[in-house]
Amino acid sequence: MRHLLISTVALMALAPAAAHAVEADFVGVRAGTLGGGVEFGVKLSPHVTARAVANGANFGYDDTTDDIRYEGDLKLASYGAQLDYRFSETGPLYVTAGVYQNDNKVVATGRAKGTVIVGGVPLTEAQVGTLQGRATFDKTVPYLGLGARWPIGKVEINLEAGAYFQDSPRVTLTSYSIYADTPEVQAALETERKSLEDDIKDFKTYPVVELGLRYTF
């Protein structure tokens, strides 16, 4: 919440100090690759709107890496502020930039079936045990996007696409096994951790596509 307040104040400070009075622009709901969300917009000038946005969702997944099956969740949670600039006061297109408090993460549980090869080392199911993995990203991240607004009376449809720059994931991997502290298992786990980091490296630049429905004031 602290980051959200700081971001909102910073973005509003960058807006042009026009003679127009600040007024409510819209309140809305949205859904897309950042999950479901809500937003509130304040018009700072005929061309500039500041927004407070909150998004969140959970997506389950399963994957196999080095013969170890992982089941887990992509947990999305972000809160932030954006500043929109409309090219025309009555036109639909706008560019937008923002700053977010980023709580996106991946959590997973992995289990081996029989003997597996990890980093060139054969490990039994007992040596691997149950693996708990977690991937996190930068906590404060920038966002850039392009969108369009189409009014239908007091209702407005909004479509936006952009990129969420959350940097490379940081993965931790813990084994719950009586052999977890042996040098052989520790070396294999570090190899597996790096392999998982490589598997999800594309999340560093997260694509954003959001469809919104708004009530305008």
Image (cartoon, helix red, strand yellow):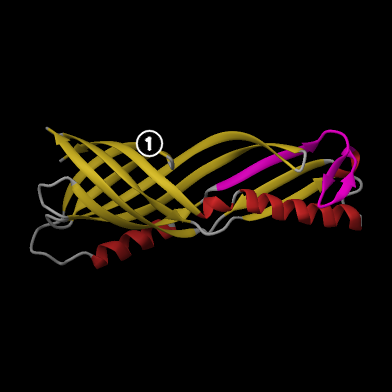
129 w.r.t. 191: above or below:
above
Characterize the local packing of mark 1: few (<14), some (14-19) or many (20 or more) Cα atoms within 10 angstroms.
Answer: some
Q: Quadrant of residue 129?
A: top right
x then y, percent, for residue 148: 23, 44
Viewer-proximal residue, 48 or 161?
161
Give the residue at x 63% y 48%.
199
186 w.r.t. 109: above or below:
below
Q: Amino acid at mark 1?
A: Ala
Q: Quadrant of residue 63?
A: top right
Give the residue at x 15% y 37%.
151
183 relative position to 134: left or right: right
x then y, percent, for residue 189: 80, 52
91 relative position to 12: left or right: left
Q: Which residues are magenta?
A: 105-125
Q: Can residue 181 be spotted in the picture? A: no
x then y, percent, for residue 196: 68, 49
Give the residue at x 77% y 55%.
191
53 relative position to 203: left or right: left
**SS assignment at label 1:** strand
Q: Magenta segment, principal secondary structure?
A: strand
Image quadrant where one finds the N terminus = bottom left
Residue 151 highlighted magenta (yes or no): no
Give the residue at x 11% y 57%.
21
**Location of mark 1 (residue):** 31
x then y, percent, for residue 68: 76, 39
